[in-house]
């Protein structure tokens, strides 16, 4: 259980730095390329070295944060090994962001499925070989590296000619626009895994393992609404310029679809939590079942809360949303600090539910202001 807690803490901390490596570039590509498709080659060749520079920065920032948090050297070593996965994943998702901007979402799906499959395959081999935790973490690094190399060999045939152009003026202009996307994405990613980190800091590795076992299902299921929101982003970008009336209709329909899509998952998690936890992890993890039930209720909010970003990030008012995003993050922190010491891992789940409810109100209040403007 304790080893599983260390594993979850390592993943949670490193995943928080994935958006640092991106620094809002993906959203910039998704916003600009649908409007200016002729700029694709120019953007790609100039963003590739910039993305590499940002990725290196993110890697070392993750290790520094681990030291600041007072983690032991063994934990820092785990972070250093698993953190290497940021490099190949950053390359893969730069490529898929251009394909997403062309509304070719299947490439992102292929990347995700391939990475998960390879990681699971290698991880199972390492587990049956009774290798240490470090090898389990390396499975993800190797899976990401293989996918990145395959995608890199395909970019020319996808009309993304490989280039390495160091254009500092372009970089300054890009970062001047993308930083706000980066801040919002970094906040969102830290926010998503904040409860795991708080449990780790306040309760220790054992309880992190318990809580993380339940939260893993939420992390996996969130990919479903995120994929739908991502698929709608290029359309939202165009409609934001062409017709806000049509954009409002698409947004309302999208919220309805996401809400209805969430209900089967919510019901399964709420009423089948004991069966799911015992089947996936064994009876030793049964204490996580009530947590999964509460997180299942929060899942409906996770589904509908992915869509407002399409409107907010395409708006010229996006910088005005920053204080509200920080407010939502602060709500999550305060709820976690109050509820976790009192109600342990169940308190963490209730903190997530409360923060998601606050986020729904904040996000949609801002969206309707933008759409009315």
Image (cartoon, helix red, strand yellow):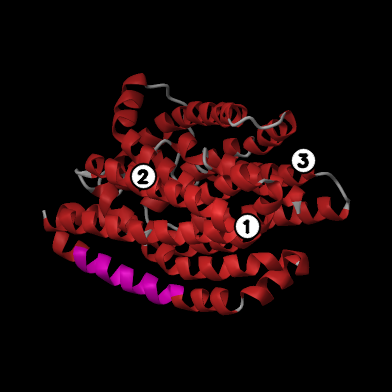
> Residue 270, relative to residue 136: is it above or below?
below
* Residue in the foreground of this view, choosing between 8 and 54: 8
| Badge 2 vs badge 1, beta-carbon distance below 8 Å | no
How many residues crowd around disc 1 within 10 Å: few (fewer than 14), some, or many (20 or more)? many
* Residue in the foreground of this view, choosing between 23 and 326: 326
Residue identified by numbered label 1: 211
Residue 27, label in figure:
2
- State which quadrant residue 320 falls in: top left
In the image, 255: left or right of 238? right
- State which quadrant residue 213 falls in: bottom right
**SS state under label 3:** helix
> Residue 330, relative to residue 177: is it above or below?
below
Residue 343 coordinates in the image, percent (x, y) = 56, 58
Task: Look at the image and give the residue range highlighted in magenta.
Answer: 248-262
In the image, residue 288 lies in the stretch drawn in magenta: no
* Residue in the foreground of this view, choosing between 229 and 14: 14
Depth check, mark 2 against mark 1: the one in front is 1
**SS state under label 2:** helix
> Residue 265, relative to residue 234: is it above or below?
below
User: Gap in Å between the C-alphas at discs 2 and 1?
Assistant: 31 Å
* Residue projecting furthest to the right: 129
User: Gap in Å between the C-alphas at discs 2 and 3?
Assistant: 33 Å
Decide which of tag 1 and tag 3 comes sooner along the chain. 3
């Amino acid at each position: 259980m304790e080893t599983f807690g260390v594993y979850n803490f390592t993943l949670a901390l490193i995943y928080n730095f994935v958006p640092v490596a991106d620094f809002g570039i993906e959203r910039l590509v998704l916003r600009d390329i649908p409007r200016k498709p002729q700029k694709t080659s120019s953007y790609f060749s100039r963003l590739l070295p910039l993305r590499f520079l940002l990725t290196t920065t993110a890697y070392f920032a993750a290790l520094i944060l681990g030291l600041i948090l007072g983690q032991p050297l063994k934990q820092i070593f785990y972070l250093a090994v698993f953190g290497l996965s940021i490099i190949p994943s950053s390359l893969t998702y730069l490529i898929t962001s251009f394909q997403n901007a062309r509304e070719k979402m299947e490439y992102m799906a292929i990347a995700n499925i391939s990475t998960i499959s390879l990681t699971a395959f290698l991880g199972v081999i390492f587990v049956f070989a009774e290798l240490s935790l470090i090898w389990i973490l390396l499975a993800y690094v190797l899976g990401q590296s293989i996918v990145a190399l395959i995608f890199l060999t395909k970019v020319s045939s996808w009309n993304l000619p490989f280039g390495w152009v160091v254009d500092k003026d372009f970089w300054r202009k890009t970062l001047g626009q993308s930083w706000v996307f980066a801040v919002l994405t970094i906040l969102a990613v830290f926010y998503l895994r904040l409860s795991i980190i708080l449990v780790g800091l306040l309760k220790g590795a054992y309880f992190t393992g318990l809580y993380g076992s339940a939260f893993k299902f939420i992390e996996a299921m969130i990919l479903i609404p995120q994929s739908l929101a991502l698929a709608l982003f290029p359309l939202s970008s165009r409609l934001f310029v062409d017709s806000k009336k049509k954009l409002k209709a698409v947004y309302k329909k999208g919220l309805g679809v996401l809400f209805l899509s969430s209900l089967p998952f919510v019901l399964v998690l709420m009423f089948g939590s004991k069966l799911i936890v015992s089947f996936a992890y064994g009876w030793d993890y049964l204490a996580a079942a009530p947590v999964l039930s509460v997180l299942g209720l929060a899942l409906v909010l996770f589904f509908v809360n992915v869509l407002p970003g399409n409107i907010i990030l395409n708006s010229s008012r996006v910088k005005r949303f920053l204080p509200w995003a920080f407010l939502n993050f602060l709500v999550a922190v305060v709820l976690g600090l109050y509820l976790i010491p009192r109600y342990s891992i169940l308190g963490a789940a209730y903190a997530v539910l409360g923060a998601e409810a606050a986020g729904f109100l904040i996000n949609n209040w801002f969206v309707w202001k933008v759409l009315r403007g």
